[in-house]
Structure formats: structure tokens, C-alpha cells
Image (spheres, rainbow, N blue to C red):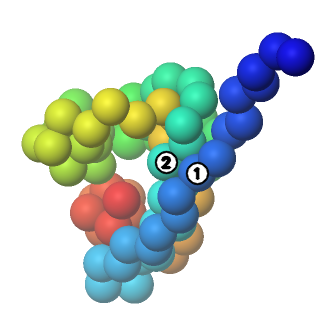
Amino acid sequence: MAESKTNTYIETIGRRKTSTARVRMHTLGKGVTVDDRDARDYFKTDELTRVAVSPIALVKADVGAITVRVSGGGIHSQAEAV
């Protein structure tokens, strides 16, 4: 019998001011998507992208795909919530 990989995830919520980010770290896949768009496309500047993904780079986490749903606040506050 072949071993199948299942896509499990860990979910957490981040908040900053009035922004909320629901983050899921998946075991399969690659990349960071925010509201179904690539993080670099959602956060228009390199600075905001760096703010959003720096915790992952800091711990050098070897995770699969990361999906994020954000709501409320401004774009900078959303990046900090992530």
C-alpha cells in the first residue's frame, strides 16, 4: 500500500491595532499567500513584505505553504499582524 501525504496545518491568529491575520502553516506546498495572492503582490513594497515574512526567516522554519487571511486596519498594520 502506497503511503499518501496529507496536508495538515497549524492555525494561529495575529493582531495589530484593528487588523487581524489568520495564518495557516501547511505541511505541503511552498510560498506565502495573502488573501489568495502572492505576499509580494499583496504587500506592494519590499518593506511590508519583509515585515510580514521576517518571523519565518528569523527562525528558519522549514514549513510548506503559508496561507493568510487578513482583515481590518491599513496595509502596514496588516503586515504587522501577519
Q: Earlier in the sequence, mark 1 or mark 2?
A: 1
Q: Secondary structure at mark 2?
A: strand
Q: How many C-alpha atoms fall within 10 Å of the one at disc 1: few (<14), some, or many (≥20)? A: some
Query: Which residue lies at the image location 48% right of the left edge and 31% below the top edge?
Result: 64
User: As drawn, which residue projects farthest toward the bottom?
Assistant: 18
The reply, left or right, for residue 36 in relation to residue 34 is right
Q: Quadrant of the C terminus?
A: bottom left
Percent position of residue 22, x then y: 52, 66
Q: How many C-alpha atoms fall within 10 Å of the one at disc 2: few (<14), some, or many (≥20)? A: some
The label number, if any, that marks residue 9 in the structure image: 1
User: As drawn, which residue projects farthest toward the front?
Assistant: 1
Query: Which residue lies under the disc numbered 2?
Result: 25
Tell how many labels: 2
Percent position of residue 7, x then y: 68, 38
Percent position of residue 38, x then y: 51, 30
User: As drawn, which residue projects farthest toward the left?
Assistant: 58
The reply, left or right, for residue 48 in relation to residue 65 is left
User: As drawn, which residue projects farthest toward the right?
Assistant: 1
> Is 82 or 30 nearer to us in this picture?
30
The reply, left or right, for residue 22 in relation to residue 61 is right
Q: Quadrant of residue 16?
A: bottom left
Q: Quadrant of the N terminus?
A: top right
> Is 7 or 43 nearer to us in this picture?
7
Query: Which residue lies at the image location 55% right of the left edge and 42% below the top edge?
Result: 26
Instruction: Measure the C-alpha gap from mark 1 to mark 2.
Output: 5 Å
The reply to whether residue 72 is visible in this rendering is: yes
The kind of residue tagged 1 is Tyr
> Is 48 or 26 nearer to us in this picture?
26
The kind of residue tagged 2 is Met
13 lies above or below 70: below
> Is 10 or 14 nearer to us in this picture?
10
Task: State if disc 2 and disc 1 touch (CB < 8 Å).
Answer: yes
